[in-house]
Image (cartoon, helix red, strand yellow):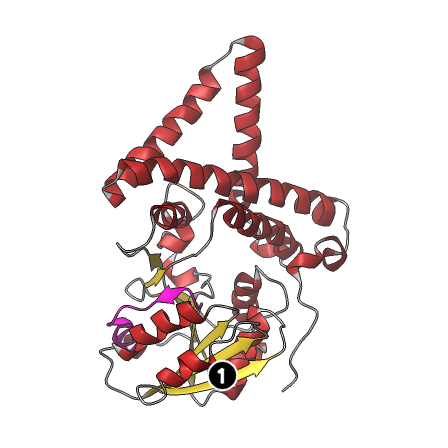
């Protein structure tokens, strides 16, 4: 197998430097290539890529902005490999990553796989708190942390692989973002391709975002899910409603406490947040990160839950057009070459 690593980038030259340095340090002995796709950045990373021209088999393409999914497709069309591995630019790759993927695919070949993410000690406290919220089994992030069924895993595009055969059959990612990765997984299932989790193929996902950006990101995740449920109702799950029910229940509990002095529901929420605190504190060996993880989890539920509720009403109940109601989720420009 010849791996082609596909990395879309948008105004993140510093991230690309860290990512490429981690690829130089791979223990994997067989040849592989790296394809960088600059998605219409105003601050490009061409000079950074040139630093690695003698250390890696690397190519660089600049194109007009059309979103990460389309940029990945563009890179896969340009790549030479028979198996594509896709990273986001804010990832750092462990030195054994490619060796683990190669071994896993040799033992049990799968046309599409995904891996989990972790936080490095060097990450900021906020980044570690967000990582906990996005990966813990105590939150909706459990699927990123590896709790989803291994043989029915929906790979996330910050860390995934897909064979050339599966890419050519599916035409790759659609123009919704976020949501392009579960959309691709479902379309692959419908074409009888398999997906799975390779637990050992983890990356360090830096997520350079503040609280406001995090809220905006998870809100978009919430808005995308009812659109996917509308497209693929057979793959809709009751658990997708959980963040909305959680946040609505929280405000009802708060109202009951303030208006009627009925505190029991609010106490239950308090126990949940206390559990989050102790779990995050234990995992990160820091009470500060434990406290920040409560903030991150509340933002995750609030942003996702309200985004989901708005999209559910407009798309699934009122049958509105997703591309008109949520223009921020769809890229209009597509690359033809």
Q: Quadrant of residue 172?
A: bottom right
Q: Is residue 33 magenta?
A: no
Residue 288 sits above or below residue 216 on the image: above
Q: Name the residue at 47% across, 66% down.
A: 157
Left or right: residue 14 versus residue 169 is left
Residue 122 image-quadrant placement: bottom left
Instruction: Please provide percent x and percent y for residue 174.
Output: 61, 69
Asked if residue 116 can be seen in this view, the reply is yes
- Please give left or right for residue 333 compared with residue 31 in the image: right
Q: Is residue 241 visible?
A: no
Which residue is at 52% across, 33% downward?
Answer: 246
Residue 203: percent from the left, percent from the top? 33, 64
- Magenta segment, which residues? 89-105
Q: Position of residue 296 (x, y in %)?
A: 43, 41
In the displayed structure, 71 sits above or below 50; it is above
Q: Is residue 98 magenta?
A: yes
Q: Nearer the viewer, residue 188 or 260?
A: 260
Report how many numbered discs are placed on residues in the image.
1
Looking at the image, is 329 positioned above or below residue 274?
Answer: below
Circle 1 sits in a helix, a strand or a loop, which is it?
helix
Residue, disc 1: 165
Foreground of the two, 95 or 45: 45
């Amino acid at each position: 197998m010849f791996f082609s690593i596909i990395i879309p980038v948008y105004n993140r030259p510093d991230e690309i430097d860290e990512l490429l340095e981690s690829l130089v340090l791979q223990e994997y002995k067989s040849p592989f290539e790296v394809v960088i796709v600059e998605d219409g950045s105003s601050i490009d990373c061409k000079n950074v890529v040139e630093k690695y021209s003698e250390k890696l088999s690397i190519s660089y393409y600049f194109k007009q902005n059309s979103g990460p999914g389309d940029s990945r497709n563009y890179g896969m069309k340009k790549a030479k490999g028979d198996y594509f591995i896709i990273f986001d630019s804010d990832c750092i790759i462990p030195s054994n990553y490619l060796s683990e993927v190669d071994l896993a695919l040799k033992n049990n070949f799968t046309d599409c796989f995904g891996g989990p993410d972790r936080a490095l000690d060097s990450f900021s406290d906020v980044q570690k708190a967000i990582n906990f919220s996005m990966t813990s089994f105590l939150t909706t992030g459990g699927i990123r942390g590896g709790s989803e069924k291994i043989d029915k895993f929906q790979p996330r595009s910050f860390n995934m692989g897909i064979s050339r055969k599966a890419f050519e059959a599916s035409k790759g990612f659609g123009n919704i973002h976020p949501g392009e990765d579960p959309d691709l997984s479902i379309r692959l299932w419908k074409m009888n391709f398999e997906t799975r989790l390779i637990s050992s193929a983890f990356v360090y996902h830096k997520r350079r975002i503040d609280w406001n950006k995090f809220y905006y990101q998870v809100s978009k995740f919430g808005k995308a899910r009812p659109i996917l449920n509308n497209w693929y109702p057979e793959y809709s799950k009751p658990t997708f409603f959980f963040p909305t029910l959680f946040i609505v229940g929280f405000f009802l509990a708060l109202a009951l406490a303030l208006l009627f002095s009925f505190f029991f529901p609010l106490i239950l929420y308090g126990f949940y947040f206390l559990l989050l605190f102790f779990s995050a504190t234990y995992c990160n060996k820091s009470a500060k990160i434990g406290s920040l993880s409560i903030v991150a989890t509340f933002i995750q539920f609030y942003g996702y839950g309200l985004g989901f509720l708005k999209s559910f009403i407009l798309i699934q109940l009122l049958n509105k057009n997703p591309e008109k109601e949520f223009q921020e989720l769809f890229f209009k420009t597509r690359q033809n070459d």
